[in-house]
Amino acid sequence: MSVLARSVGNAFRNKIRTAAVVAVLAVAIGLALAMLVANQAVVGKVQELNASVGTVLTVNPAGAQGFDGGGEPLTTAQTATAAAVPNVVSVVGMKALRLQTETAASSSTTGTTTQQAGPGGGPGGGTSVVTNLQAAIDAGTLGNRNNTSGSTGTGSTGTTGTGNAGTAPAFSLPITATGIGAEVDTAGKALNITSGTGLGDYTVASTKALIGTTLAEKNSLKAGSTFTIAGTTFTVAGIFDAGTTFGNNAVYTTLAEAQALAATPGELSSMVVTVNSMENVDAAKTALQAALGSGKADVTQGQRNLQTAVSSLDSVKNISLVAFIAALGTAGLIILLIMVMLVRERRREIGVLKAIGARNRTIGVQFVLEALVLVALGSVVGAAIASFASGGIASALISSNSTTAATNQRGPGGGGFGGGLGGGGPFGGASQLLTSVTASASPGVIAAGVVAVFGVAVVGALVPALLTARIRPIEVLRGE
């Protein structure tokens, strides 16, 4: 009988024990593989950040900060100034709008196109216009609280001043709308269009629009459907997925169309500037600030704004790597203990084999192969466990670390304006990056993990295998 056949047979000699060993190994190996998948997913996301957000600068009007800021708006002419700065590869102008449903707008004392100072104003002061769309986000406690704190009217619909102050109507959240000069979102990343097409030429006025997935579902819209903004009929060119609930309660139009809807031709709410490499970001930021003027524009670096998010991702990466190593070590320790026990049980068998001429190396290889058979079975079950569990484990790790980071970022007492429309949470755009990390058990990652497991298993089985060389046939046979 060959060494391999004898090893496989020995692995199944005690079926109950084999099943128990395989089950324990499967848990350890499954955890190791799941942690490796989570680690690789986070590494990929960090690389994506370095390739995109890390080279993005955001330009806002000087002094603008949500609905608390002020200053003068940016202009389209300033995009040419920004584009002329060394190392700048692209400049995308944006115009912020807030779309309010017709029913909510009709109960307000403001007109259909007004500069609104309430919650929801982004940098540069968004412009509110009416639409027949229904917001995909319920106002809830935070929305109604922010609306109440921001209301200063004196009519029957107001919450302060004179009139019937106790009968304020139900608040409907505005819908975020942005005019863009290229197919990128407000963070400078390419829009993820899931159905339909883009808008074509983003520099000219067009009644085509892109709409977020949840907003489309709320209003039963698809590519080719129509809706209205300020009395103008728009056609849905495509549906996009921003990765967050707030981000998908949004509409994108061309920059020229948004400027026309706001009746502010040539005016921008912000600019997204992309630099050619991370090494040139700091120099480009300084040059861009000088070219635009410190009294006219504020230039911020996307990577530094998202430092908290990146720190959370790095924490997840480190935790998952440590957990992967620990799980590998556990699997190796299990193999070591099992094989030591088997060597002790089979002393007589080993002595007989040596007495009939079997070499120490042959007997040692037999025990190593037996250990690898057990590991192979555990790896099959563990890979299945990792395929189902890796996504949940990664999400739990990311959620735990982002929550801790958010608490540290806000400090005691909570954050900002309760997640108002303009704030976007304690991380700003970082929350989208945290929640958009997808852990999928790809064959390559699983294969790499299994190779690591087999390597540890060989090391764990070598020590017991070497112990067989110390067994003397004459001592074993004399004791029988």
Image (spheres, grey):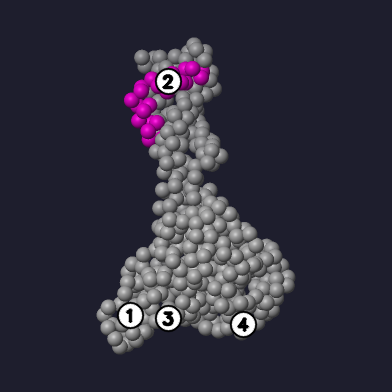
Q: 302 or 193: which is nearer to us?
A: 193
Q: CA distance from mark 2 to mark 1?
A: 82 Å
Q: Label 2 sits on what residue type?
A: Asn
Residue ID for mark 4? 296
Instruction: Judge depth for marks 4 and 3 and give the one in front.
Output: 3
Residue ID for mark 3? 110
Residue interval drawn in magenta:
3-25
Dot 3: within a 10 Å radius of its alpha carbon, few (fewer than 14), some, or many (20 or more) residues? few
Q: CA distance from mark 4 to mark 3?
A: 29 Å
Are dots 2 and 4 in contact, CB under 8 Å?
no
- Whichever of labels 4 and 1 marks the residue nearer the N terminus, that label is 1
| Whether residue 86 is visible | yes
Q: Label 1 sits on what residue type?
A: Thr
Residue ID for mark 1? 157
Instruction: Judge depth for marks 2 and 1 and give the one in front.
Output: 1
Q: 397 or 100: which is nearer to us?
A: 100
Q: 94 or 351: which is nearer to us?
A: 94
**Residue 285's spot in the image, x, y percent?**
65, 73
Residue ID for mark 2? 10
Q: CA distance from mark 4 to mark 1?
A: 37 Å
